[in-house]
Image (cartoon, grey):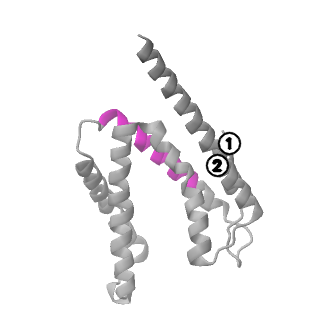
């Protein structure tokens, strides 16, 4: 609950870290929570129905399916003009299409298959921290005191979860040894 509370604090505070923007648009948070819901549903579905499949194949098919949906939607909404894209834009496009959907998806499916949905979901609490620090280091965004409190709550909550998990594993091992 502490880790979730920290993540919720970051979202509810409305702070963006952007010097020129004082409040975030609530529609953005709605979209993020919809994304979390669909991602969580996908994780459970993957664990239930995809254990016997190869993680590379699942991730590849997932990436292909997303591409087949997103490309026509992008063409419909914004058009298609490759002449406006420069070399750094192509590099960014290649990286973002491989690193996020495919490699990230591959690691996600592998983690779900190997460690389960709950353990894999713990990674989701780290994303706001990595994003906040990355935004500050590379984009000049500001980390506010509220954001620091949210990060501390997330780290503390994850630490408590890990301690409890380690104690349970130790108790199971001790019980197995005594038998």
Q: Secondary structure at mark 2?
A: helix
Question: Residue at 71% of width from left, 59% of height from top?
Answer: 148
Quadrant where the image shows the N terminus: top right
Q: Residue furthest top?
A: 179
Q: Label 1 crowding class (10 Å Cα cut-off): few <14, some 14-19, many 20+? A: some
Looking at the image, residue 159 sits to the left or right of residue 90; the answer is: right
Q: Is residue 66 left or right of residue 165?
A: left
Q: Mark 1 or mark 2: which comes first in sequence? A: 1
How many numbered callouts?
Answer: 2
Depth check: 30 or 2 in front? Answer: 2
- Residue 47 is labelled as none
Q: Determine the residue positioned at 37% across, 44% down.
A: 111
| Residue 69 at x, y percent in the picture | 34, 60
Q: What's the mark number on residue 154?
A: 2
The Cα–Cα distance between marks 1 and 2, rounded to whole angstroms, is 6 Å
CB under 8 Å between callouts 1 and 2? yes
Q: Nearer the viewer, residue 100 or 30?
A: 100
Q: Label the magenta part by its dominant secondary structure.
A: helix
In this rendering, would 23 be left or right of 111?
A: right
Q: Is residue 20 above or below residue 101?
A: below
Q: Residue at x 75, y 59 (%)?
A: 146
Q: Is residue 145 visible?
A: yes
Residue 82 vs residue 115, the one in the foreground = 115
Q: Quadrant of residue 120?
A: top left
Residue of label 1: 2
- Where is residue 149 shown, x and y percent of the image? 73, 55
């Amino acid at each position: 609950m502490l880790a979730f509370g920290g993540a919720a604090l970051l979202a509810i505070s409305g702070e963006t870290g952007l010097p020129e923007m004082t409040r975030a648009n609530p529609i953005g948070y709605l979209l993020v929570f919809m994304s979390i819901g669909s991602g969580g549903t996908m994780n459970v579905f993957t664990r239930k129905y995809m254990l016997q499949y190869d993680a590379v194949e699942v991730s590849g098919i997932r990436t292909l399916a997303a591409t087949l949906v997103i490309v026509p939607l992008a063409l419909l909404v914004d058009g298609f003009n490759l002449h406006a894209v420069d070399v750094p834009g192509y590099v960014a496009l290649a990286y973002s299409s491989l690193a996020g959907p495919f490699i990230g998806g591959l690691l996600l499916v592998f983690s779900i298959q190997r460690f389960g949905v709950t353990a894999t979901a713990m990674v989701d609490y780290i994303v706001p921290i990595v994003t906040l620090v990355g935004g500050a280091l590379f984009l000049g965004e500001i980390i506010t005191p509220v954001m620091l409190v949210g990060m501390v709550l997330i780290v503390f909550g994850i630490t408590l979860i890990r301690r409890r998990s380690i104690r349970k594993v130790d108790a199971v091992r001790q019980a197995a040894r005594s038998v």
